[in-house]
Image: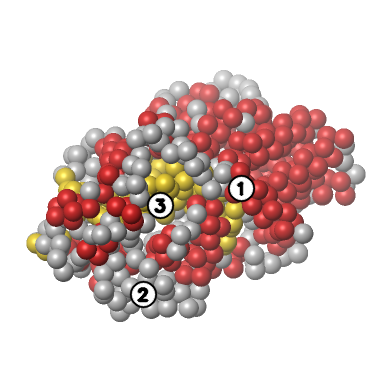
Amino acid sequence: MARHLLFTFISFLHLCGIAKGNEVYPSWYPKVSCERKWAKLPNKGQYSYDQDALVTEKGNVGYESYRERVERDKCLKEWTVLVYMAADNDLSPYALWDLHEMESQLANELNLGSSTATTDVIVELDTYYDTGVRRLHVFQTEEKYRDDLGLSDYERMDERFIRSPIVKSFPEMGQGRVQSAEARFKNFLSWGVQNYPAKNYMIVVWGHGEGFLGQFHEESFKRKELMDLIPLRKSARKSPRESSRESQFFQAEDFILDSFVGLPQVQPFSLVKQFGGIAFDYSDQSFIDITSMGEILANWRDKLLEGKNFDFLAFDACLMQSMEVIAEVARSADFIAGSNQVQNYLGLPYRKLLDQINKGATPFDLARSLPLLTKDSWGDQGYQGSVDPKGLRTFTMSTLAGAQIESNLFVHFQKVASQLLSYIKEDPKRKNELLFILEKAPRFQGDMIDLGLFYGLIEKLLWEESLAGGETAKSTMLRQTVGQAHYRLKEVFIESQFGSLYYEGRESERAGYLLGYFTGMSLWLPANEELYYMRKFEMAKSSLFKSVTSWNSFLEELYKLPTIDLGPL
């Protein structure tokens, strides 16, 4: 019944244009479709590898004659997929692997093409090779997908392995210019939208990800007075491993979930900074912080698309599906896809994805199908599962409706935070119980806890408290609010899929049920006070904290340390 109501609600969004996308297009858009404009052209405007290609030591530079023939910027397609591929790091072989997948034909797949009369696939590629940055217009070839190639093979290759034509190339901006990754991302979006106009835009940010990082991360990290803000003398503070915090309801083993033990971890970027950000460039030592990414998306939405949202934003990167990241980008994208876990480096199932787009999928169709396509690709019969059979167990993928973030997700999260604040103020012992749970709770890198799992932890605490006779009017109100927030959370998700580790791990009767709350979207919740104070200044500037003011108040109260008079030192 709940599932039926969810799809009824989504169908309503679709009919209202929220899920489908606004049909009022920017005034500068071409009025004629590329299909119509190219109807009488040879191959109906399709790139010809036999006639157009010009293979040199730099790769396929045969694009100019095709560009002049089709005048792409003067017609409109259904889809343009813009892939910002930040592979100037140890991901370079995987970038070539994904590009080979995009332009070749796979067994048991539809192979409807990459760029076609209705779709364009444009990739900005930067690898660790000393070849600069290149923009590729990706077209499907007649070649079969090389399933005999593995990682060691791609490590010996360079960009010349890719057959798709180079549209443009330019040198990198130079080491030490921290904003270079942001500048390239901004320029790529602007150039891509103007040269490849389409009714629907999908932006894929491809590369290493570490989750949320704000614009003020440098200020927060370098503040010398940081420790003075903690009202405990340095000699009196205990590290998390030395914690003496105890609970009257729980033991540490109550929160041990084997599903969260031994999960893959990302190697933090070498630049001295807080954990977080995306699209790391090892040569330039630069990256994109998430606040800046949100501003870039909003700026180009307003300037180029005249207020029309980008239809789909997908993160092919680790740890990006979090409340803090989503809060920065939701105002510019109708749908958001990503993982709150460490993604397998093989990435999204691009052949399946492009086939769906070329079948005529709407943005809503894509939001509903992408997590399922990802799961299918990691299955026994999938081409990614054949490379890494264990990949299916740890993956997470969810898609969210951007229009529901403010009006649904944040509204109910605000109520939970407000009730939590009242709850811990009513009885100081409750604060200790919550801190004990957070210290022991299963989490992902970057101090991230799955949002649904967090709601489950609160309900677990409230249940134990009621059994001990400690239930009050405030705890009852909190229980009802959390239950409603968790139920309404389902309306924000279009689809979510995750590996067997997140629902088969019934390690103990007391802990196993928590996995039933797992959603695939995370929240920053530090394990202790010190970790909170290390990032509170940065997080306070985030859109989440500005939108959900009671959450900031709750965290301040939760992590507030008592002043201890140690006497003369």
Given residues 475 and 489, the one toward you in this image is 489
Per the image, label 2 sits on a secondary structure element best described as: loop
Q: Position of residue 269 (x, y in %)?
A: 35, 47
Against 224, residue 305 (above or below) is below
The kind of residue on which mark 2 rests is Leu
Q: Looking at the image, which residue is at 62% across and 31% down?
A: 548
Against 49, residue 26 (above or below) is above
The kind of residue on which mark 1 rests is Leu
The kind of residue on which mark 3 rests is Glu
Per the image, label 3 sits on a secondary structure element best described as: strand
Q: Position of residue 161 (x, y in %)?
A: 20, 66
Q: Position of residue 245 (x, y in %)?
A: 68, 43
Measured in 3D between alpha carbons, the distance from the residue under mark 2 to the one under mark 3, in whole angstroms, is 24 Å
Given residues 224 and 506, the one toward you in this image is 506
Residues marked 2 and 1 touching at CB (< 8 Å): no
Residues marked 1 and 3 touching at CB (< 8 Å): no
